[in-house]
Amino acid sequence: MHHWAALVFVAAIATHMLRVFLTGAFRKPREVNWALGVGLFILALLEGFAGYSLPDDLLSGTGLRTAATILGSVPVVGTNLEMAAFGGQYPGQVVIPRLYVLHVLLVPALLVALVTAHLLLVFYLKHTQWAVPGRTNRNAVGQPMVPQFVAKSTGLFLLVFGSLTVLGAVAQINPVWNYGPYRPDLVSVGSQPDWYVGFLEGALRLMPPWDTVVAGHTVMWNVFVPTLVLPGVLFTGLLFYPLVERWMTGDRAEHHLCDRPRNRPVRTGVGVAGIVFYAVLLLAGGNDVMAFVFRLSVEAITWVLRVALVVAPLLAFAITRSLCLALQERDRRRLAEGEETGGVEQAVHGELTEGHRPVEPAVRYRLLMREEPEPLALPDEGPVTRRRRLRVAASRWFRGHRVELPASEEERASVRSRMEPPRRAD
């Protein structure tokens, strides 16, 4: 049950971050909370890996062997890092006690500290909210702590607890008694890490066997790049994405309303492309299992996944952006023509037309409540730097894709007033 709970814990953080990303809930004034969320996610990965390694069975020992190789791949200081972590040559005698302290004391303390800071900021800033009648960018309409919020939280807790109990009772995971104790000279067949670090295993398997010998020292690019450079780039990109989007759009206003993902097709496309990128790496982590099950060549699967790692995210981005624009077009037709009634009318001359009724006011409010900022533009006069041209091009790429919705001038003025940021007292 503990193992299943750990898997669900990391999945819950990842799902929550995805929701925050797709709805734009990371924008001002919540950038710090987004950074805390990224930190929580990284700590959850570390906590899961430390706990996964504690049984010291053949499977977890294989993971520790991989971790030792990753540390040793760092140029110049890799060997020193590995010796320091393991208290000598691998496997050493101190790594398990150190992981135990890390797992039960240090990382949990950091998790509690970050969760506390995160909740305090949520309490101060309030949650973002969906655009429904009565909710604007200037107010925060929530629910009382008692009884609504307490009842929902208690129900969710009982639901998760019950699901984990059932999984712990009927779904076996990592039977260490079958693997046996760890031996450095053995590796269990079909060794697979937990899902949240499976992308590192996949990156290792897809990376070509590149290395460089410099002054008698071997730099293992085939380990260093996929396990340290790649996650470093990914998590740094996640951490600073709010600042990148602000730089592209020039938007420094406060936002308390959630974006509908379809109204931000580029951001939604980037999010889906990231999911597909991770999924390809996760599949690559089991290329040997897939080859055995489907009776295919491991090398053929590896090359297919190498190509997919580049092509699939680009296709996912293009398809997602097109789907978002198609959904915006559907919203435009709903506003212009109304909701379909399911009835068909026939004119005197024989023409058949679909029956429509006006969109309900609450639905019309939800569809029209969206920001429609224009992309940044180049100045009419004066010199233009390359950085300015790059920023304008990025802004047009990010904001240049949308479908105009039919609305009267009165409705547009009402939407603009409701979307204005709150006024701060001097």
Image (spheres, grey):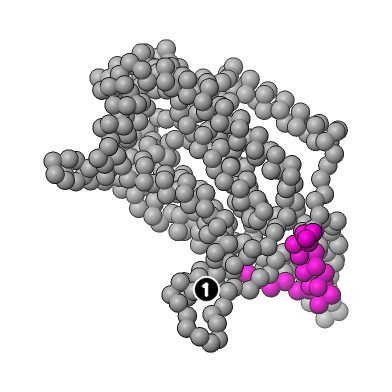
Q: Position of residue 352 (x, y in %)?
A: 78, 73
Can the viewer see residue 386 in this picture? yes
Q: Position of residue 417 (x, y in %)?
A: 80, 68
Q: What's the residue at 58%, 42% (across, down)? A: 36
**Pointer 1: residues within 10 angstroms few (<14), some, or many (20+)?**
many
Task: Based on the picture, tell me whether residue 213 belongs to the magenta stretch.
Answer: no
Q: Position of residue 19 (x, y in %)?
A: 63, 47
What is the magenta range?
402-426
Front in this rendered view, residue 80 or 37: 80
In the drawing, does residue 117 fall left or right of residue 150? Answer: left
Name the image quarter holding residue 121. top right
Q: What residue is disc 1 on?
A: 392
Front in this rendered view, residue 201 or 149: 149
Q: What's the residue at 72%, 50% (across, down)? A: 128
Q: Give the total of numbered labels.
A: 1
Q: Farthest left residue?
A: 216
> Looking at the picture, which amino acid does disc 1 mark?
Val
Q: Position of residue 377 (x, y in %)?
A: 56, 78
Q: What's the residue at 43%, 75% (across, down)? A: 386
